Amino acid sequence: MKAVATGFFLVVTLVYIATLWHQAAWPGSFPAFRGFVRAGSEAGMVGALADWFAVTALFRHPLGLPIPHTSLIKKKKDQVGAQLGDFIRENFLTPDLVERQIREVGVPRRLGDWLAVPSHAERVATEAGAALGKLANLPKDEDVARVMQTWVVDRISEPDWAPIAGKLLSDVLEEGRHRPLMDLVFERAHEWALTSEPIIQKVVSDDSPGWTPRFVRGLVGDKIHRELVEFTARVRYEQDHGLRRAMDRWLVELAEDLSNDPAMIERVEKIKAQLISPESVEHVAMLLWTKTKQTLQDPSGAMQERLVEATLRIGVRLQESPELRRRLDDWLVGSARYLAERFSVEAVAIIGETVKRWDVDDASRKIELNVGKDLQFIRINGTVVGSLAGVVIHALSLIAFGP
């Protein structure tokens, strides 16, 4: 475009020279028409030169002359960067404007419509699975297992388990939260007793002397079964039954021993040492991490299917639930307003700092390459408008003052 603009200037210059030559060669030939052409070409040259100077002065000194108020980009680079940042912050990053834009876009509705499409859900699941797979490959297996082992051994094995268990059991007993569990145990015991007659008869038959008559063994078995059913029924339905009270006393004593009995505490610690020994924890940690890693890296496994299903459900929920869309929209607006209020200054400061770090010559060249094409149209327009203005002024002069 720079060559085109220069070409316009050369054309009007040649036309002007041609009018001078024509006047010298044929003074009386077409003087009126020649006057209009000369005025237009002369004004076109002036307009072209003026706009060339204006455009060039933005980026460098015209003809290398240090004329004041030229090479503006180089001189005002830092100021332009700061003002550009302020302009963006004041006109694009105000909390109210950000909120209005988010509300108008309707992100939840669009997101729901997009996620509800199976192909889109599969794409999201694939990308999420790939990201998780890459994350799983970052740490070494041994390092992950070592961290898990250290966390388990250091965090879980540091305190004594017995006092903690004793305090927890004591709190459960005081609040009566163990009673539903006891009810369930006695209910299952009674249900088993109701169906236990064949087992009881077999035990009685197997343990009775061989000379005992069969009907006697049957009577004994029936008696034991009947007593067992009646006993478990009473325990099940009588909240104040002796066995229930005995169980409560035993649990209270157990809680007390766990909290205060050195022998009990030592026994629990031995059990703990066996459960979370470094070797066993490392083995379990490695197995867990290996299985987790395999699951994350399997693009066609169950996890991928669950991700697709979950994504589709989210999309459908967003489509069908105005309340969910409203809550998500409010969350987005609140987050955006918070970011705009807290970090807009820091965000736009990046623009000013980036421009400030640019080399002045490099910055001038970048800006000229990006907007230079439009600026060359200014030169072209200046040439055309100048020529038309010259013709109009010449015509007005003839009308006002004559030839």
Image (cartoon, helix red, strand yellow):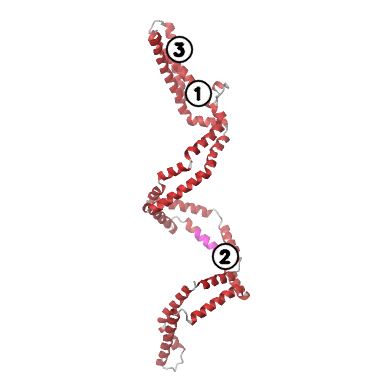
Report the disc number at residue 314: none
Query: Measured along the vertical axis of the image, is residue 207 above or below residue 61?
Result: below
Relative depth, front residue between 400 and 59 = 400
Mark 3–mark 1 CB contact (< 8 Å): no
Q: Quadrant of the C terminus?
A: top left
Residue under pointer 2: 281
Where residue 394 sits, quadrant-wise, is: top left
Q: Main secondary structure of the magenta part?
A: helix
The alpha-carbon separation of the residues under discs 3 and 1 comes to 25 Å
User: What residue range appears in magenta?
Assistant: 276-292
Q: In this view of the protein, can residue 302 be seen by the observer?
A: yes
- Find numbered disc 2 in the image and state the secondary structure of the residue it sits on: helix
The alpha-carbon separation of the residues under discs 2 and 3 comes to 97 Å
Q: Earlier in the sequence, mark 1 or mark 2?
A: 1
Q: Amino acid at mark 3?
A: Ile
Report the disc number at residue 17: 3
Relative depth, front residue between 140 and 243 = 243
Q: Residue at x 43, y 59 (%)?
A: 302
Q: Quadrant of the N terminus?
A: top left
Within 10 Å of disc 1 (Cα), the crowding (few <14, some 14-19, many 20+) is some
- Where does the image place residue 271, in percent across and percent down from the top left? 58, 72
